[in-house]
Image: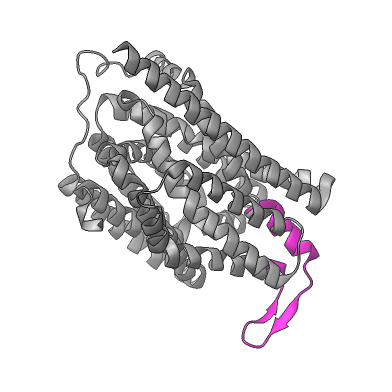
Amino acid sequence: MFKELHPNIRIRIYTSFLSRVVGSMIFPFMAIYFTERIHATAAGIMIMVTILVQFIASLYGGYLADIVGRKKMMVLGEVLKSFAFVGVLLSNSPWYESPWITFIMLTIISVAAGLIMPASEAMLIDVSTKETRAFMYSINYWAVNFSMMFGLIIGGWFFTTNFFELLIVLVIMSFLTLWITQRFILETYTPDVSKESTSYGIKPILKSYQTVINDFPFLLFTLGGISILAIEFQRNNYISVRLSEEFTAISFPLLGTIDGVRLISLLTVENTLLIVLLTAVASKWIKGKREEPIMYAGFILFGLGYAYMAFSNNVMGLIVAIFILSIGELLYVPTRQSLLADIVDDSKRGAYMAFNGFVFQIGKLIGAYGIILGESIGGMGMAVFTIGLVLIGIASSSLSLRKRKRVVNIKAVNI
């Protein structure tokens, strides 16, 4: 079935896989890089700035994807990325090193990513159908997880000792991705040149997103996504902190001494491996079935797994919890993405996909707040909080889809 997907989808999965493999060797460790060369506070601020810049750029990139086309924005972003990667390489060579220039280049990379992602997401919707979207998103999710796992393993081994060599590979891969995008990606969207193609200022951007903000069903669906993603981001925040403080180190014959930090790393590897190994099975099972109930079942399993992790220090229990939440993840991710594609306005897909970035950004903020909240309400309180987020996710998504169906039915009657 993979061969039956539109060539753009297959090419995007290939290029995304290659980019993420190499990127995961480097970017997850950049906080360590800046901490060692400047200090921890500056490292935190720098990372936050790059996240904020990427989000702002994605809003503009989503708007531009709707008025100039998908491919142009993707190529422009890849050009900026290649330029910035060369800058990172030159500022971290054996002959010259500058963490400040590196930060400027990373900021440019964030701008590039903000231009690429909304256009790429919109393009995937352009060339897919309702029947193929769940499968497409399942395969894409598998590729993302596998590439990140592979890259993290290599980066963890070579980042401190062979950073310059990793950057050389990154530059080569960026030019390869640029060439593939320019050469093989087909434009999938022809904008209405009579309306918006000459409007690049702030006012038309705000007007474009006004349509999105006034789309109440979409906002409800976004709220549901934020609730579920806020659960996932607890793993790198509250759950990691809790296990590092509360888990008593134990020894295993082959693994040696496992403390809380190593345990959360092993649990993350388990989660990634399960996603990689079971994606094909899950996508085959989902095919042809109603997506909405499958998504809700995924929400519930996902939340139950994380609720248990919020308070338990039992190793076997945590391993089982990861298995349960991984099954939930396999069920809800492709179905939610497919349902999302159905409810967006076809003429504003870039803007909708950019606005959908709120799901990740606000989810990250709530995830970070979990550290503070957990100090006040404890593990059992966080478990209840997690279940509450699941209920919000289900209620918001259900109400959103019902309202969207009602709007569609009204339009059909008026035609």
Position of 230 with respect to 74 (left or right) is right
Magenta span of residues: 236-261
Residue 353 lies in what quarter of the image?
top left
- Count of number-bearing discs: 0
Q: Residue at x 23, y 50 (%)?
A: 5
Q: Residue at x 63, y 47 (%)?
A: 231
Assign the C terminus to one quadrant of the image: top left
Between residue 166 and residue 205, name the one nearer to us: 205
Question: Residue 405 in the image: x percent, y percent?
Answer: 43, 26
Q: Residue at x 63, y 50 (%)?
A: 303
Residue 212 lies in what quarter of the image?
top left
Between residue 357 and residue 201, name the one nearer to us: 357
Q: Is residue 70 above or below residue 176?
A: above
Residue at the far left: name it. Answer: 183
Report if residue 106 is visible in the image: yes
Q: Residue at x 44, y 21 (%)?
A: 406
Residue at the far top: name it. Answer: 414
Report if residue 89 is visible in the image: no
Question: Is-magenta flag for residue 110?
Answer: no
Question: Residue 282 in the image: x percent, y percent?
Answer: 42, 59
Colour scheme of this structure image? Answer: one colour
